[in-house]
Structures are given as structure tokens and as C-alpha cells.
Image (cartoon, grey):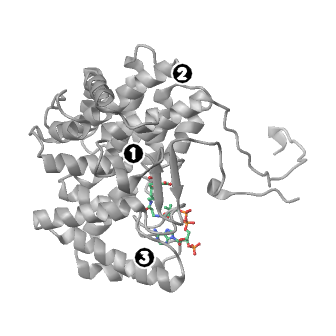
Amino acid sequence: MEPTINRGLDGINIDTSQICSIDGMKGELIYRGYDISELADKVSLEEVIYLLWEGELPDRQQLDAFRQELSELFTVPTEVIDIFRTLPKDAHPMHAMRTAVSALASFDENPDDVGAANIRRIGAKLVAQFPTFTAAFERIRNGQEPIDPDPGLSIAGNFLFMLSGERPSEAATKVMDVALVLHAEHGTNASTFVARATASTLTDVYSAITAAVSSLKGPLHGGANTAVMQTLEQIGSVEGIEPYVLDTLSQPGGRIMGFGHRVYRVLDPRAIILKEVSRHLAQESGDSKWFEMSLEMERVMDREMARDGKQIKPNVDFFSASVYRMLGFPSDMYTPIFAVARISGWMAHLYEQYGDNRIMRPRLIYEGPMGRAFKPLGER
Ligand code: SDX
């Protein structure tokens, strides 16, 4: 029988999991049994991290203890922050993120032990430190000094505070929390799969997360939100959307960034929520350009994909671009924000992988030559 090949591991189940369920036909995303549309604007990122890791939403006492645990871990070793000062000013933020995670391993007192207690200790450090070094990078590349974290603020609030130096409004903190909750977890997407595959050799957490950050950067994955905004900036107006989309789709392999998904065949439930967040921010700010351009791109793509009989809809990266723009982030910082959220999901999956591991080793079907006669160098 011909061996089957699933390119891109399409449809392949690598294990069972208790963390996340995605129904691509219904457009349903479940975190540990809770529908994301139920959670998104009702819980903080800290409650979602606790849920993803422990399997239950925390009660008040558990949440306070978890917040206290994380608040003591926000600070990043100065030596790691100082690496950013040695990078060129135009260094890609995701190259900087990857470097920071890798460097943190050398400052951890026990980086290589993959026992449950130690990976939980490292996981708490990483979810607490990602916002700190991400904000520090952004300030250093702009010639500003990093701002120390405020242990009294939430992860979302601290992130905004460490970027601007001002206490964020409740409204801005809420929007940041919703965006981070929506980006926290999504099953075996490419970067989570890379984290699990890397951990399956029983290498350390920092190595697995460095690999995940590397994978997330790609424009087909977490890099898409940056690509969406760079596309909108390049087009520049609502009137420019239709010609751009038609021209791109007319090219072989042409892709409109922020659309399509390996699993969703209907609108990504996260895009539904982020679309409304973007609408709200556009109304509040009076700057509706990016939201209007996004609506026009969605309209043209809906029409063109329906005509071609394809189920290509906006994904999580499409409307998050206009949300982050209206929050004031530069477009190349959108993927680092994705990583600030997804470190929670990556760690949840590492707990599962290390907890019941088998090394991952898929195969390729060899189609090269066989039985070739060797000739020494002098005779070739
Ligand atoms: C994320 O996996 C996850 O869960 C990821 C994520 C998470 O939370 O971790 O949800 C986050 O990464 C979302 C995806 C962000 N990427 C983009 O927006 C980049 C643009 N999208 C595409 O490159 C694509 O849709 C992928 C990469 C998302 C999915 O790729 P697939 O499943 O391999 O699909 P494909 O490229 O083989 O396309 C299938 C068909 C093709 O038609 P044919 O060439 O076979 O005739 O759909 C078409 C494609 O042309 N298509 C698109 C399209 N995406 C698919 N056509 C135009 N524009 C697009 N964006």
C-alpha cells in the first residue's frame, strides 16, 4: 500500500491533550472546557494562565497568590537587558526576543532540570519576564531607559506602563488584557508544535521556548499581524484595498495576510471579538482609517473567496493589527505582543509534553537515487 504523506502534518494527531479544543467548522475555541467568547472580556490574563496550567479557573485566594508569585518575578537580569544595547537600532524585535529568552537560560539557577516543579518555576518566570524584556527592547531601541515593572500592576497593565512610563487607563489595560487572553493558547499551531517537538528530546525549557519564538516570527504564523499592518500602510487608503486584493490574488501563490487558517473554515472566533474591539477603539479615538480599511479588505475577500468557492476568512492576526495600531504600537512590535500572550500556552503544552513524553521523530519517503558506485576524488 502506498504510504500516506500529510504535508504540513495536515490532519495529523500527535497526542491527546486537556488544554485546548478548536472546532474549525463551528468556529469554536475552547480553553479547558470554557468557550473563548465566554472568557475573553470577563477574565484577566492571569486567570487564563492559571486555567491553562492548572485546569481550573482560580478562586479569589488562588488568584491573589498567583498574582503575588508573578509580581515577584517581573524583573529581568540587567545583563540580559543590556544585550539589547549592543544590538543595532534596526534589529528585528523578534530576533531580540529570541536572544533574550536564550540568554535567560544562563542566568537561571537550574535551567536544565525538566522535572515538573522546575519547569513550573521557569514557566512562572517566563510569563512574568516576557512583558518586561519586550518593553525594555522597545524603549532602548528608541533611545530611552527601560522602566522597572510595578509589582502592583497586572501583566497587561505593567506591559503598558513599562512601555510608556505612565499608568495606563483602565480601558487601555482592559483592551490589552482581552488581546492577550485571545492570543494565549491555540492547540498545536506551528510554534507550539515546535516547542513540544523540541521538548520531546528532554532538552530544557529555555531551548524549547527559544525555538517557539523563532517559529512564531514567520509571516505565515505570528508574523502575520505585522504583515497585515505593513500591507495596510503600503495601500494607504480604503480605495486602494480592492485593486491590491485583486492584484495579489491574481498572482500565483498570492496571499492576503491575516486571512486563511489551517483549521478554521469559518471566521476565527478571536477575529469576531477583535473586530468589535477595533470598531470600539476606532469610535473612541475618532481615527477609523485602519478599521475602515480592514472592513473593506474583509468585504473584497469575502466576495472573491465566495466566487472561488474557498472558505478563506479573517484570522486572529487580521483585526489585531488595527487594534494594536490604535493602541499606539509600531507594527513590528505586534508579533512580540503575540509572544507575550502565547508564552502561557507554550508552557501549558510543555507541562503536558514533559509530563508524558515520547520523542518526536516523523519520517520522509526517500525518492533519491540508490546503489551508486563510489569514485575516489581523483576519478570524479
Ligand atoms: C496564526 O495554526 C494556528 O492556530 C495559528 C494561529 C495561532 O493562534 O497560533 O491561529 C495564528 O498563525 C494565524 C495565521 C496567520 N497567517 C496568515 O494570515 C498568513 C496568510 N495565510 C495563509 O498563508 C494560510 O492561510 C495559512 C498559512 C494560515 C494556512 O495555510 P494552509 O492551511 O497551508 O493553506 P494553503 O496555503 O495551502 O491554502 C489553501 C488554499 C489555497 O488555494 P489553492 O492555491 O490550493 O487554490 O486557500 C488559499 C490558497 O490559495 N488561501 C489563500 C490564503 N490562505 C489560503 N488565498 C489568499 N490569501 C490567503 N491568505
In the image, residue 300 lies at what x, y percent? 37, 81
Circle 3: element type: helix
Mark 2 CB near ligand 1 (8 Å cut): no
Name the residue: 44% across, 24% down. 120
Q: Quadrant of residue 277?
A: bottom left
Viewer-proximal residue among 16 and 95: 16
In 3D space, how far apart are the residues under numbered discs 2 and 1 (Cα atoms)? 22 Å
Q: Is residue 79 left or right of residue 158?
A: right
| 19, above or below 288, in the image | above
Secondary structure of the residue carrying tag 1 is loop
Q: Can residue 337 be seen at all in this image of the molecule?
A: yes
Marks 1 and 3 close (CB-CB < 8 Å)? no
Q: Which residue is mark 3?
A: 248
Some atom of ligand 1 lies within 8 Å of the CB belonging to the residue at label 3: yes
| Residue 104 tag number | none
Pointer 2 residue: 114
- For the residues labelled 3 and 2, the Cα–Cα distance comes to 46 Å
Which quadrant of the view contains residue 17? top right
